[in-house]
Image (tube, rainbow, N blue to C red):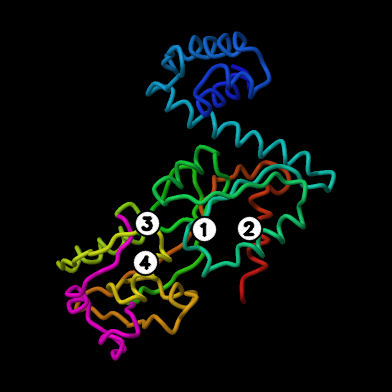
Amino acid sequence: MEIRHLQHFIALAEVGQFTAAARKMNIVQSGLSVTIKELELELGAQLVNRTTRAVSLTSAGELFLEHARSSLATLNDGIQAVRSQDGVVRGRLHLGILQSIAPYVDLPVLLQKFRTKYPEVEFAVRSLNTDVIPAQVHAGYVDLSFHAVMGNEKWAGLKVIPFKQDPLVAICSCKQELARLRSITLDLLAGEKFVDLTPERGLRKLLDGVFIDHNLKRESLYQVSDVYMMLQFVAAGLGVAIIPSELTRYWAHPEQLHALRVTTSGAPLPKWRIVIVTRAQRRNLPGKTTVDRFLETLADMKVP
């Protein structure tokens, strides 16, 4: 098996067509077909379902794709570490971010500092949902990502670095009666109309778990996919919400929102926890990786 086998297979999986994938790899279509057949023969399994218009991965193909990406990513780390020995840092850094990362790090300033310091590094940023982050990092599609965790999650082959913790607070419109209070019990809060995120979002999953753990139900009157739209709904008096405290501070119109401490009769509310997820690095490789350098740039920005 050669590196080109992995590269061609990944290109085909991402593009979904032999013609387009061959063009992307700058080879003829027949050459790509031969490469895939050689790979399938060596693995003893069919990797793609072929049709006249497109291809799709088999279950074996899906499994192999994850390992192929991870293998190329590890190889790339080694190549770039060696090439950087001349003092010029090269390589790539594909970064994953959360929609609600802004209160915890000045991302534009961070990226500008990194790009200024390492202009030869290929850089890309994409916003990701929490569900896909571990798989994207493990597969090498993303080199490093901020990630919200609900518990003490661990993933084989991944390194989890603590970043921020933020207490949860209830928020309401400053025009509501609740705005006269400084704190509220979770039991009383459960009787209010809620503005929630959609079920797949990390914060929504965390809150659903809180109410289940306390044997409480709430009416989720509005469900939105965007954090700042949720804050707009609450500011307009359409309902209440529970959010990380820093989001209230970061809100563009803080005078419209009132935060309340939430008390419980049992276990206190969990904190909103953000970690950084990256692949576990092979420490026998010489030099620093682009991930190492990004983490150093991030550490330099932290307030002591």
- In x, y percent, where is residue 193? 22, 71
Q: Earlier in the sequence, mark 4 or mark 3?
A: 3
Mark 1, Cα crowd under 10 Å, few <14 / some 14-19 / many 20+, is few
Quadrant position of residue 268: bottom left
Q: Earlier in the sequence, mark 2 or mark 1?
A: 1
Determine if residue 151 is in view: no
Residue contact at pointers 2 and 1, CB within 8 angstroms: yes
Q: Which residue is mark 3?
A: 225
Q: Which residue is mark 4?
A: 230
Q: CA distance from mark 1 to mark 3?
A: 27 Å
Q: At 78% from the left edge and 44% from the top edge, which residue is drawn?
A: 84
- Residue type at tag 3: Ser
Return the residue nearer the eye: 260 or 257.
257
Asked if 293 appears above or below 177 in the picture, the reply is: above
Residue contact at pointers 4 and 1, CB within 8 angstroms: no
Discs 1/3, front: 3
**Badge count:** 4
Q: Which quadrant, please, contains the C terminus?
A: bottom right
Q: Which residue is mark 2?
A: 295
Query: What secondary structure is found at the residue carrying circle 2?
Result: helix
Q: CA distance from mark 2 to mark 3?
A: 29 Å
Residue contact at pointers 2 and 3, CB within 8 angstroms: no
Q: Earlier in the sequence, mark 4 or mark 1?
A: 1
Asked if 246 appears above or below 281 in the picture, the reply is: below
Q: Is residue 223 left or right of residue 136?
A: left
- Residue type at tag 1: Ile
Residue closest to the far bottom: 180
- Residue type at tag 4: Met
Q: Which quadrant, please, contains the N terminus?
A: top right
